[in-house]
Amino acid sequence: MQDRAKAMTRFSKGAIALAVTLILLIAMLHFGIAIYERNAYEAYALNALSRASDVDELNEAVGSLGIVLTYPDGWLAIAYKDSHHIPWSLAVAMDSKRRIYRSTEHFCGRFATYKYFRERVSGWEPYHDLNCLAECRTVDEAGLYLVKEMGFDGR
C-alpha cells in the first residue's frame, strides 16, 4: 500500500510539474505574440507615415484610430493601434519635420473619438489633452507637448 501511495505522489508531482510547464509555455507564447504584433505595427506605421506626401495620405496612414493635426507650419500625424485580447498599445507619431514620437500608453479610442466630435460637434472637446495638442501654435510646440504632457518618447 505504501508503494502505491509513493507512486501516486510521484505521479501527482510529475503532473503538477507538467501543468506548470504548459502554463508557462502558453504565457510565453501569448506575450510573444503581443510583442510581435506591436513591433509589426510600429514598422507598418513608420513606413506608412514616412511615405505619405499629403494630408489625405496621412489620414489613410494613421488609420481609423489615429489622427492628423495641422498647424500653420506643418502637421502632426499619430497612428494608433491596440489589442485588448493580448494587452498592448502603441501610438507612433511623426511630424512634418520627420521627427518620430512613440508611446505605449493605452489611448483606446481617444484619438478617433476626438476627431469624430471635433469634426461634427462645434465647441465640444471631449479630451482636454488632445484639445491642447490641437491648439498648439507650431509643430515644435506640439512635439514638446506630446513628450511633456502626453508621455510620448521623442526620437
Image (spheres, rainbow, N blue to C red):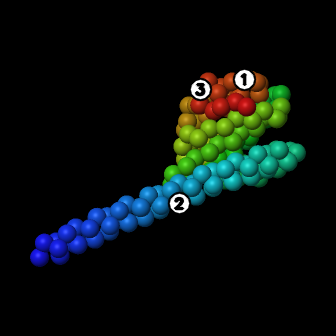
Whole-number angstrom distance, CA of label 1 to CA of label 2? 41 Å
Secondary structure of the residue carrying tag 2 is helix
Residue 149's disc is: 3
- The x and y percentages for residue 52 are 84, 47
- The x and y percentages for residue 125 are 58, 36
Q: Which residue is under mark 1?
A: 141
Give amino acid for label 3.
Answer: Glu
Which of the two discs, 2 and 3, labels the residue nearer the N terminus? 2
Give amino acid for label 1.
Answer: Glu
Which of the two discs, 1 and 2, labels the residue nearer the N terminus? 2
Secondary structure of the residue carrying tag 1 is helix
Whether residue 119 can be seen here? no
Secondary structure of the residue carrying tag 3 is helix
Whether 1 is drawn above or below 132: the answer is: below
Q: Residue at x 62, y 24 (%)?
A: 148
Q: Nearer the viewer, residue 134 or 78?
A: 78
